[in-house]
């Protein structure tokens, strides 16, 4: 029984160590993406995407999809990110 308890304890990380790792690790790309999504151009693209999604979701039979709107939003966000992300990465 003692051997099994030691194996279980050795395989699990301490809760304190796990919390410290999560607090210290921040992906700068995610931070910049969130800021860029709030820019005027991205907000407009997101509104078009959401309007398309609600339109497509309200119909039972449609061949329309929101691929173009999704790509427009991602392009606008990534264009903004490309100009800002390297300033925060050193």
Image (cartoon, grey):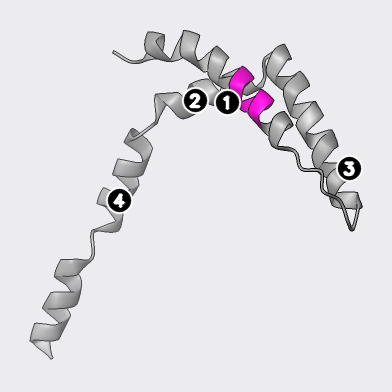
Disc 1 versus disc 3: nearer the observer: 3
Vertical position of residue 33 compared to residue 70: above or below: above
Looking at the rendering, the stretch of residues picked out in magenta corresponds to: 71-76
Residue 17 at x, y = what percent? 25, 49
Distance from disc 1 to disc 3, alpha carbons, whole Å, reads 25 Å
Residue 88 at x, y = what percent? 39, 13
- Please check the rendered image and state whether residue 13 is part of the magenta-colored stretch, yes or no: no
Would you say the residues marked 4 and 3 are in contact, meaning their CB atoms lie under 8 Å apart? no
Please rate how many residues cluster around mark 2, counting C-alpha atoms within 10 Å: few if below 14, some from 14 to 19, many from 20: few
Distance from disc 4 to disc 1, alpha carbons, whole Å, reads 25 Å
Q: Name the residue under label 1.
A: 34
Distance from disc 4 to disc 3, alpha carbons, whole Å, reads 43 Å
Say left or right for 59 vs 69: right
Q: Mark 4 points at which residue?
A: 18
Disc 4 versus disc 2: nearer the observer: 2
Q: Mark 2 points at which residue?
A: 31
Going from the N terminus, do you reach mark 4 or mark 3 first? 4
Q: Give the main secondary structure of the magenta stretch.
A: helix
Q: Name the residue under label 3.
A: 55
Going from the N terminus, do you reach mark 4 or mark 1 first? 4
Distance from disc 3 to disc 2, alpha carbons, whole Å, reads 30 Å
Q: Residue at x 64, y 23 (%)?
A: 37
Say left or right for 17 vs 4: right
Vertical position of residue 17 compared to residue 14: above or below: above
Would you say the residues marked 1 and 2 are in contact, meaning their CB atoms lie under 8 Å apart? yes
């Amino acid at each position: 029984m003692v051997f099994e308890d030691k194996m279980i304890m050795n395989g699990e990380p301490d809760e304190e160590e796990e919390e410290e790792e999560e607090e210290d690790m921040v992906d700068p790309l995610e931070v910049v993406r969130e800021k860029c999504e709030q820019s005027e151009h991205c907000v407009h693209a997101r509104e078009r995407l959401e309007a398309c999604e609600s339109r497509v979701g309200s119909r039972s039979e449609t061949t329309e999809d929101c691929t173009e709107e999704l790509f427009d939003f991602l392009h606008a966000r990534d264009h903004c990110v490309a100009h800002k992300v390297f300033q925060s990465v050193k």
